[in-house]
């Protein structure tokens, strides 16, 4: 669950800021012995709302990942209230004006959140995104629009999974071109 984060701390001596409003994730994190450079916040990221919102729980009761948006993997009849904050509110609260690596897996809410992040004055060197196009029955993948927007903002894809669900971007200022 946080092996990537712990490896970054170990190998790069960096601070990690993690965010997750999911009850099972919060319980799991609270049972861990974490390094002091790992900063966990028990709220999620939202495109437009800072405050308490409806959060859809997974269809599978043993599942962990819920979502702000209705899609094939959530139960529309099972919701809880969770705290969410916008990217601008989070970066302002933490006094961040630059992010080295932003890793995001937010179960279908990434499209709207990424559109807000693209317009933010916060500089980001790399983005590691898991897209959830598979959860939506649409004629065209939502991720296609996001990739085009990031390209216009100077980002290049430097890695992708075989399914193209996980895509890694790097800003042109970090490349020797």
Image (tube, rainbow, N blue to C red):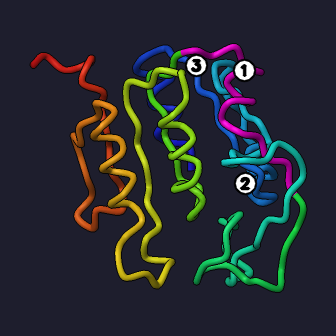
Q: Quadrant of the C terminus?
A: top left
Instruction: Verify whether residue 86 appears in magenta.
Output: yes
Mark 3 vs 1: CB contact within 8 A: no
Q: In percent of the image, x 24 and y 42: which residue is there?
A: 157
Q: Assign a secondary structure to mark 2.
A: helix
Q: Residue 173: where, in percent of width, then height?
A: 26, 17
Asked whether the residues under the numbered discs 2 and 3 touch, taking CB atoms below 8 Å apart as contact, a structural biologist would say: no
Tag of residue 92: 1
Residue 21: x, y in percent? 77, 51
Instruction: Describe residue 136's horizontal placement relative to residue 49 as left or right.
Output: left
For label 1, the SS is: helix
Q: Is residue 56 above or below residue 68?
A: below
Q: Considering depth in this image, is 50 or 74 the residue closer to the camera?
A: 50
Residue 25 tag number: 2
Which residue is identified by label 3? 15
The stretch in magenta equals 82-97
Find residue 68 and report its image quarter.
bottom right
Label of residue 103 in the image? none
Residue 13 lies, with reference to residue 75, above or below; the image says above
Above or below 97: residue 109: below
Q: Quadrant of residue 152?
A: top left
Cα gap from disc 2 to disc 1, whole angstroms: 24 Å
What SS does tag 3 mark? loop
Q: How many neighbours does mark 3 have within 10 angstroms: few (below 14), some (14-19), or many (20 or more)? A: some
| In the depicted structure, whether residue 96 falls above or below residue 143 | above
Residue 101 is left or right of residue 159, and the answer is right
How far is the residue under mark 3 from the one under mark 1?
A: 17 Å
Residue 12 lies in quadrant: top left
């Amino acid at each position: 669950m946080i092996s990537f984060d712990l490896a970054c701390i170990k190998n790069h001596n960096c601070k990690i800021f993690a965010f997750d409003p999911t009850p099972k994730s919060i319980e799991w994190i609270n049972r861990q012995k974490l390094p002091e450079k790992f900063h966990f916040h028990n709220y999620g990221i939202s495109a437009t709302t800072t405050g308490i919102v409806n959060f859809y729980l997974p269809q599978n009761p043993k599942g962990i990942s819920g979502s702000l948006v209705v899609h094939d993997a959530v139960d529309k009849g099972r919701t809880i209230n969770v705290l969410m904050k916008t990217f601008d509110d989070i970066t302002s609260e933490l006094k961040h004006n630059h992010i080295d690596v932003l890793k995001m897996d937010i179960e279908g809410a990434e499209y709207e959140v990424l559109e807000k992040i693209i317009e933010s004055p916060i500089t980001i060197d790399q983005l590691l995104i898991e897209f959830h196009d598979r959860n939506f029955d649409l004629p065209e993948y939502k991720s296609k629009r996001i990739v085009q927007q990031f390209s216009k903002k100077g980002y290049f894809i430097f890695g992708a999974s075989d399914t193209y669900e996980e895509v890694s971007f790097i800003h042109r200022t970090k490349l020797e071109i």
